[in-house]
Image (cartoon, helix red, strand yellow):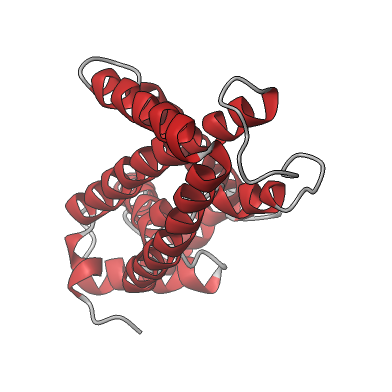
Amino acid sequence: MKLSEEQISTLFLFTKKKWVHWYDLQVELVDHLAARIEEEMTIDKELTFQKALDKVYAGFGLFGFSKIVQQAEKAVRQKNNKIWLNAILAQFNWPNILRSVFIFLVLMLAGYLAGMMIVAFIVLTGNFILNFISLYELRHKQKKCAKLLLTQHVSAFNVSYLFMQVYLFPNLFSSASLHISSPASFFLLMISFSVIVISFASKIVVDKIFNEAEKLYPEVFAMPAH
């Protein structure tokens, strides 16, 4: 027996009343509920839609959908963490490794000529400003599709905030002109290089997740942002 559009709408309202607020998770649950209800109503011709729904929902146990929501959120976090790792590793695969090596050499040369302290300050300050722009764009995208669990565990992973605190550490930055071969200068070089690499990875991660979300749930992106 095939459920009507009105009954499908009822299932969406039902999942929402049961504290499932993510649209993508609602879609999965509604598909599952609909299939089970259709099966139950096919077996028992006298079974009403509401009784079939109650019977199917009872199978989820005392806590209903709560465990499924927790598992879905955990799965999304793990998936996004994997995307992050792959995006960072991709910066050292061909041909991106050429860009990474070039950036490292430019930073090292600039540090030798101008002092690593100055180079690190320029890189971190510039990235700090760009992070605010990226964060604004990210929040706008998340607001646009606030109902999707798929896009809620995305962050720009902007580490420059932490590194800016390192910049203020007096024992490490006692001189504005650190020698390129000194441990402190090398540490600044690696920090600056890491910030730039992670910024490239951040762009890849955000684009990949939101492009996938828009492809899977175009109707959500078509809605006006609230």
Mark count: 0
Write down the quadrant of residue 171 in the picture: top right
35 up-or-down from 78: above or below: below
Please state which of residues 185 and 124 is positioned toward the viewer in this rendering. Answer: 185
Q: Identify which residue is drawn at 54% across, 37% down.
A: 116
- Percent coordinates x, y for residue 220 in the rendering: 25, 68
- Percent coordinates x, y for residue 129 in the rendering: 44, 64
Residue 72 seen: no
Location of the C terminus (image quadrant): bottom left
Furthest toward the top, the residue is 94
Residue 58 seen: yes
Please state which of residues 77 and 64 is positioned toward the viewer in this rendering. Answer: 77
Please state which of residues 89 and 57 is positioned toward the viewer in this rendering. Answer: 89
219 up-or-down from 211: above or below: below
52 up-or-down from 59: above or below: below
- Percent coordinates x, y for residue 208 in the rendering: 27, 43
Q: Identify which residue is drawn at 27% across, 48% down.
A: 207
Furthest toward the right, the residue is 171
